[in-house]
Amino acid sequence: MAKIVKLISKNCGNIKPGSVEDYVKAGGYAGLRKAMKMEPLEIIEEVKKSNLMGRGGAAYPTGKKWEQAYANQSKPEYVVCNGDEGEPGTFKDRLILSQDPLRLIEGMTIAAYVFKIKEGYIYVRGEYLDLQDTIDSAIKNAVKANYLGDNILGSGFSFNIQVVWGAGAYVCGENTALLESIEGKSGRPRKKPPFLTQVGLHQAPTLLQNVETYSNISYIVEHGGEEYQSYGTEFSGGTKLVCLSGNVVNRGVYEIPFGTPIKEIIYEIGGGIPDGRKLKFVQLGGSSGACFTEEKLDTPMCYKSLRDNGLKLGSGALLVVDDSSCVIDFVKCITEFFIHESCGKCTPCREGNTRIYEILDKFSEGKAKKEDIDELNKISKIMKNASFCGLGQAATTALNDCLRYMKDEFLEHIEGHCRAGVCSMSGKEK
Ligand SMILES: Cc1cc2nc3c(=O)[nH]c(=O)nc-3n(C[C@H](O)[C@H](O)[C@H](O)COP(=O)(O)O)c2cc1C
Ligand code: SF4
């Protein structure tokens, strides 16, 4: 039976967002107070024990990142939070930013304390400008209550946070493009290595994590890494904020323990598919994520189990698609998104997405031939292998999976028909 566990979402909807009084009453800042009595390496050890993987999509172990950064001769000089959240179907960081921003601020402050960092940045996507007052007032209130700013809680440690607003580019979620954007340049990815913990913001070593990642830190420090880990599985510690959207009854953000099967999330927490329709496929991790059908639904949400099944958790978005949707239209919609979001720096991504869209359009028009499937596979392979950053490399993940699991429907379009209720080929709507 699927359960919802509220470790980092427990305050959401229950306290006044950004009120230090409410946050502390709900147990907030116990993590920072405890951290200030610990040695930096002890804190890093707890983060390692927690098995917390970065929640921004790449799933790099947070404890390992901190340990490596700490071992560097030049320690990080900036703490940066990635709140770009541009992945379609992903709105979990928004939950924290809008409902419990002090949890994020506390996590960043603990990270800053570990490395004795004085300056932090929260980079938020431009589309979340409605959260400006909430985030600003949370920072102001934390400074006023001496949890942020100069000489925090009389410890001699000082740390300040600035908020930087993006202008609505998906690629600015890529960590190096994000730093370029903070520096006032156009948001285009840098070459890696060097990695951010060596050369980051203003060329200085930088610690960058996702909103959800930082938001787990105070719980881990307060309760210990082992306790946090025990909520999840051996390979995936703790809980995950999952965003359910699409053709599902209960859409929303749910905090689930790692190990919960995808099927239970969709049918028990999500209430299943509405209007008596059948599930066609699921996309996991946003528009750059994998698509799969019924047979993989029993896979537990756990980094290892997903990997063993050829899947990735990505941002944690679960998009449910029912049998009324046309698979060609779905992939076209995703390709349109990537055409719009490609920064244009490299040819495979800039040109590849457009060429793929043109071919897909032939399927919609009933003018495609079997060779067009080979052409789609060929362009996709080039993009995956030769694109400069993760955007181009992952842009055709959905296309590849749809071709793998639903090739019949591509062939049907070649023959001039579509089984779905809604399809742009005929404009039909059942
Ligand atoms: C095109 C692209 C977009 C990305 N968008 C985001 C994003 O919106 N938020 C995020 O946290 N990470 C995003 N990432 C991943 C970041 O580059 C980085 O791995 C992550 O922020 C590191 O934090 P974490 O270790 O806490 O996950 C994106 C990566 C790519 C390639
Ligand atoms: S893959 Fe290339 S063109 Fe696409 S966003 Fe990355 S750098 Fe820009």
Image: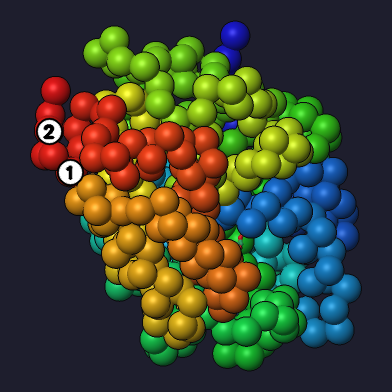
Residues tagged 2 and 1 counted as in contact (Cβ below 8 A): no
| Amino acid, disc 1 | Ser
Residue 248 in the image: state x and y as whole percent: 35, 23
The reply, left or right, for residue 286 in relation to residue 227 is left
Which residue lies at the image location 31% right of the left edge and 44% below the top edge? 414
Q: Quadrant of residue 326?
A: top left
Q: Can residue 309 be seen in this snapshot?
A: yes
Kindly identify which numbered label has been placed on residue 424.
1
For residue 268, above or below residue 220: above
Residue density around tag 2, few if under 14, some if 14–19, many if 20 or more, within 10 Å: few
Kindly identify which numbered label has been placed on residue 194.
none
In front: 185, or 263? Answer: 263
Q: Secondary structure at mark 1?
A: loop
Q: Which residue is mark 2?
A: 428
Count of marks, rendered view:
2
| Amino acid, disc 2 | Lys
Which residue lies at the image location 49% right of the left edge and 77% below the top edge? 348
